[in-house]
């Protein structure tokens, strides 16, 4: 029944490794997002896809590459992980429109050793 | 560009009392949506309430209401009859129409409910 689910919930890895986070939504939404929440709890958009098409790419290092195989899935792959990548990454989905709330997954806590 | 300001560093409220969490915003768009989210210590982001820029009535959802003052560009969240489970971080956010319709968040406010 989970509306937006992302895996894994926790990810602990070494600097320099490559890792992926997966996200799936069963709400029938057209748009999906990745947000990053830093250590000070500030949330910032990273990417947005609308029906598999990239529409927002907010000055994120190109080590981060999103992929949307279909409109229900949005994955995030991170190459050559750095200490500064430690954060909580949230997937979200919504319908387009300023009056539409975004529904968030539970987040993936990424810790770089 | 949109901007959300939440300046209260931390709020305390006695159980069963009401509390107001402040939010001011800035945008040049005439049409926009304002949202409040709750993030408990478990980490998930929970959508609470929405207010549209053209809505004449303040939004209400159960114990949550939004005190929308358009001329002052403020959208304060009022929680009535606080419960211990309301202890969390609260984020105000804004969204404008268009393809690049992301949520712009404030820094958040920590609310602690005292028994």
Image (tube, coloured by chain):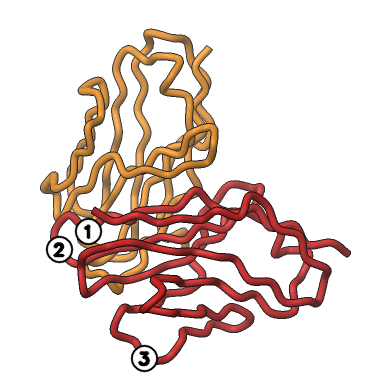
Are labels 2 and 1 on one chain? yes
Identify the image quadrant of residue B93. Answer: bottom left
Q: What label sits on residue A47 in the rendered view?
A: none
Residue beneath the point at 33% across and 78% down: B52
Q: CA distance from mark 2 to mark 1?
A: 5 Å
Give x and y (percent) for residue B3: 34, 54
Q: What label sits on residue B101 in the rendered view?
A: 1
In the image, farthest residue toward the front: B72
- A76 left or right of A103 in image: left
Q: Which chain is red?
A: B
> Residue A74 or B81: which is nearer the viewer?
B81
Pointer 2 with pointer 1, Cβ within 8 A: yes
Q: Chain of mark 3?
A: B
Q: CA distance from mark 1 to mark 3?
A: 23 Å
In the image, farthest residue toward the right: B115
Which dot, 1 or 3, sits closer to the camera?
Answer: 3
The residue that disc 2 covers is B98
Q: Which chain is orange?
A: A
- A67 left or right of B81 in image: left
Pointer 2 with pointer 3, Cβ within 8 A: no
Are labels 1 and 3 on one chain? yes
Residue beneath the point at 50% across and 61% down: B37
Label 3 secondary element: loop
Residue beneath the point at 78% across and 65% down: B13
Q: Earlier in the sequence, mark 2 or mark 3?
A: 3
In the image, farthest residue toward the bottom: B57
Q: What label sits on residue B56 in the rendered view?
A: 3
Give x and y (percent) for residue A83: 45, 15
Label 1 secondary element: loop
Check the image and report above or below for B58 versus A24.
below
Check the image and report above or below for B22 versus A18.
below
Quadrant in the picture for the C terminus of chain B? bottom right
């Amino acid at each position: 029944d989970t509306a937006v689910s992302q895996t894994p919930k926790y990810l602990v890895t070494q600097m320099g490794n490559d890792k992926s986070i997966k996200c799936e939504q069963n709400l029938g939404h057209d748009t999906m997002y990745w947000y990053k929440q830093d250590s000070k709890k500030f949330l910032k958009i990273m990417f947005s896809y609308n029906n598999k098409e990239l529409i927002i790419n907010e000055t994120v290092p190109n080590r981060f590459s999103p992929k949307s195989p279909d409109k229900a899935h949005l994955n995030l792959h991170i190459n050559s992980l750095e200490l500064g990548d430690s954060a909580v990454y949230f997937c979200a989905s919504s319908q387009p429109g300023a009056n539409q709330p975004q529904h968030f997954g539970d987040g993936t806590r990424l810790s770089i050793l | 560009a949109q901007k959300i300001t939440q300046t209260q560093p931390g709020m305390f409220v006695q159980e069963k009392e009401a509390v107001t969490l402040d939010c001011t915003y800035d945008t040049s768009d005439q049409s926009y949506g304002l949202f409040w989210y709750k993030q408990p210590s478990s980490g998930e982001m929970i959508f609470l309430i929405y207010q549209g820029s053209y809505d004449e009535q303040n939004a209400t959802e159960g114990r949550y209401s939004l005190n929308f003052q358009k001329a002052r560009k403020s959208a304060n969240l009022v929680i009535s009859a606080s419960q211990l489970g309301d202890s969390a971080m609260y984020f105000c956010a804004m969204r404008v129409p268009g393809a690049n319709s992301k949520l712009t968040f404030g820094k958040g406010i920590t609310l602690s409910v005292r028994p």
